[in-house]
Image: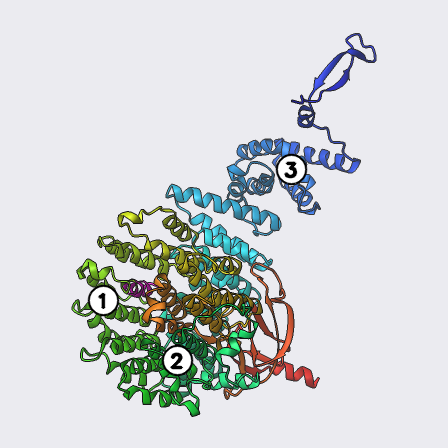
Amino acid sequence: MVGKKEVTIPVPAADNSPMEEDKPLKKTPKELKDAPIKEELSEEDQELKSQLEMLVERLKESDSKLYNPTLETLRTLILTSTSSMTSVPKPLKYLRPMYSDLIATHEAWPESAEKKFLADILSILAMTYDDEKLETLKYRKLGSQNAIGSWGHEYVRHLSTEIGLEYNRRQDSDAETDDLIALALEVAPFFLAHNAEADAVDLLMQLDIIQQIVPFVDKNSYKRVCLYISSCVSYLESPDDTTCLRTAHDIYLKHDKYAEAMLVAIRMADKALIQTLFDGCEDPLMKRQLAFMLARQQISIETEDEDLQNCLNNTHLTTNFINLARELDLMEPKTPEDIYKSHLEHKRSTQIVPVDSARQNLASTFVNAFVNAGFGVDKLMLNEEDDGGWIYKNKDHGMLSAAASLGMILLWDVDMGLNHIDKYLYTEEDNIKAGALLAVGIVNAGVRNVSDPALAVLSDNLDDSKPNAIRIAAIQGLGLAYAGSAREELSELLLPIVSNTDVSMELASFAALALGQIFVGTCDGDITSSILTTMLERADGQLGETYSRFMGLGLGLLYLGSRTQSEVTLETLKAIEHPIGKRTSVIVEICAYAGSGDVLQVQRMLHYCNDHIDTENGADDEFQAYAVLGIAMIALVLSVLDTLGKYSHDTDVEVAVNSIFAMGMVGAGTNNARVAQMLRHLASYYHKDASCLFIVRIAQGLLHMGKGTLTINPLNTDRQIMSPVALAGLMTTLVSFTDVRTLILGRHHSLLYSLVTAMYPRFLITLNQELETETVTVRVGQAVDVVGQAGRPKTITGFQTHTTPVLLAYSERAELSTEEYLAQTPVLEGFVLLKKNPDYVEEAKA
């Protein structure tokens, strides 16, 4: 071991001789470092130090007439001192040794204006002394209460910190905090006026008075304040998150920013607030924009205006989507082989490839449906030369999915869709009729029709006399067509099926799932109690069926995004001794916190996964599969492609097929070349395995969904808002894959169509006041996070200029490239209404 290096320092000899070498003083480097260093002061600094010492001495004298001019001189010296942010101002530095003397002087003086003046001086000096005593705050309260910013920005920030610390101390002891709140309400306006909006928000949030910031926010600061408040919501517990969102809403409304206020109201899922905002908006153009925003979230509200109702019903969606396809020259239908590109798949010529034509045709059915979704034309189902013939190239339940694919191809075009589907509703073949019923539900997904054709057609096929396949398809169709609508007549139709313990578990579970999709996020008490009662009354054998997972999912969807409102339901589920109770509890927890990013809930899911279950002795570990899904749903995890690529070759078939399907989900609608290549490689790898190849084909169809124009991303509006309806469809499909052999690879592959509720064009279409397409130039680039940045920072980087309509990729953001038009919404996505900028016209003329 190497010892400490010693330093020899010569010391004066005892006999006053110059030096004595034989008596060294040994010091280690640490001792030398800790030894006080005498600072050499310049003449100017020495003069300042002496002046300050003289002023402090003067304050100790008995002549009170000297106090005020002395204090004025001290204040002037402190305020006029210059220093960098990394060093202490010299007056404060030289006064620090005299701090205790000044405190004693202050305590000795009688109450007077001078005593308060000295308290002000002590308040600023305390910044360089002991933070734990909070004496900056103490002497501020004892001082003259002059303008909060008179000592400068750094003083106010220090004072703000001490206010927060003192507030926490008093909260622990239940002491009064009114004086701290009053002081904070002085500090906040100073911060807002000096580009420190984040500091103002943090302080008022810490004191639980964030709503009191509203009067202080002006036209110059409201954007940054609201952006910061909204970004904080993900880190807050209920009810603080709602309070913050309500504050942002009130600020926007104060400045007549209805579109921004509506986005906040949508995040709050407050139907009454949404209706009030919509009714309160008097600008006809803005009101149409609000209607388009609500239609994107599939939120239906009341209005008597026919034009507004069309916007709310998404009536314009199919027309504008087809126009976009024509603009991008995408109307030519694609065949499954165009997607597979089998000639690029590497296969050895000597290998004998087994032919499973029915499974291959079924895969082609789904690929054709996803790729040509919404275009209204394809080469399999709507081929005039082979009218309906493709359906019969599928077997049994395959015919159901084939007939249902019509709904996908004709998506959103209700009138044309029903005309094509109608003839299959009267066939003798139950599977084809069931598929046609499901197609009716699919074609109505995401749009509303005043005549309610889906309800009329599907409700007639729910009675006991119908075969099970037809009833289930009708139920699924209702769930997809009316997802998020929360219509009471649908509850009256489906609840009796859930409650009837005589019907099969399969039928009851699909009815519960449909109710969850229709009433997603509403926490409906009647449906909750019906599902819980059914779980308690059903026999263990029925609860053990694979379909029971959908009953649990239906219950979970009712609480999507509700957070703590699910606690009573979770307690009730503990009374169910069957493993379905545990599984459903995990699903309800997942749904309640989906998209919240709640770290504690992610940890809770990881804890579930950490348990080692002894399945050989009959223990149930299925809840762990849901817990893993929960981690993704709560955190909405993204960069997973490499991981999925690795697991797509796993020896466990279920792991492999789930990984392959997940690759399709991650790349859905992107046409991503890398994912396409990975999937072609997997098609070669699994060319002998019919099941895995089937899922590879499905993933290829998802990747090229809508020929690259559609997305299934549940986050929209610059990824600020989560769509409950979209997430409900995604979760239905994901839960189906927890028993992929029985469901997706069995006879319930039609559950793949549940993705339809999440499908939406990833376009930006600009419209004028007459709702006609208005072509303008926009810049599209990667979104930049500007939360907490002062001024007007750039919100996109690496942009390119395009003319609308344009397609937006994930993480991209668009902005108008000129000021000729004013957008009616802060986020350029979907339908954006424009109006001419009058100031721009005046500038052009000038």
* Residue 559 belongs to the span the image colors magenta: yes
Helix, strand or loop under label 3: helix
The residue where tag 3 is placed is 66
The type of residue carrying mark 1 is Met
Name above or below for residue 800 compared with residue 423.
Answer: above
| Span highlighted in magenta in the image | 550-560
Q: Residue at x 79, y 35 (%)?
A: 43
Image coordinates of residue 688 in percent, x first then y, are 45, 66
Count of numbered badges drawn on the protein = 3
Q: Pick whichever, 527 or 115, lies toward us.
A: 527
Residue 314 quadrant: bottom left
The residue where tag 2 is placed is 405
* Residue 583 belongs to the span the image colors magenta: no
Colouring convention used in this rendered image of the protein: rainbow
Image coordinates of residue 74 in percent, x first then y, are 66, 41
- Dot 3: few (<14), some (14–19), or many (≥20) neighbours within 10 Å? few
Q: Is residue 379 left or right of residue 528?
A: right
Residue 673 visible (yes or no)? yes
> Of the numbered discs in the image, which one, if any, rests on residue 505?
1
- Dot 2: few (<14), some (14–19), or many (≥20) neighbours within 10 Å? many
Helix, strand or loop under label 1: helix
Residue 264 quadrant: bottom left
> Of the numbered discs in the image, which one, if any, rests on residue 181?
none
Image quarter hosting the C terminus? bottom right
Q: Main secondary structure of the magenta part?
A: helix
Q: Pick whichever, 63 or 472, lies toward us.
A: 472
The type of residue carrying mark 3 is Leu
**Mark 1 or mark 3: which comes first in sequence?**
3
**Mark 1 or mark 2: which comes first in sequence?**
2
Name above or below for residue 640 compared with residue 818.
Answer: above
The type of residue carrying mark 2 is Ser
Q: Pick whichever, 776 or 147, lies toward us.
A: 776
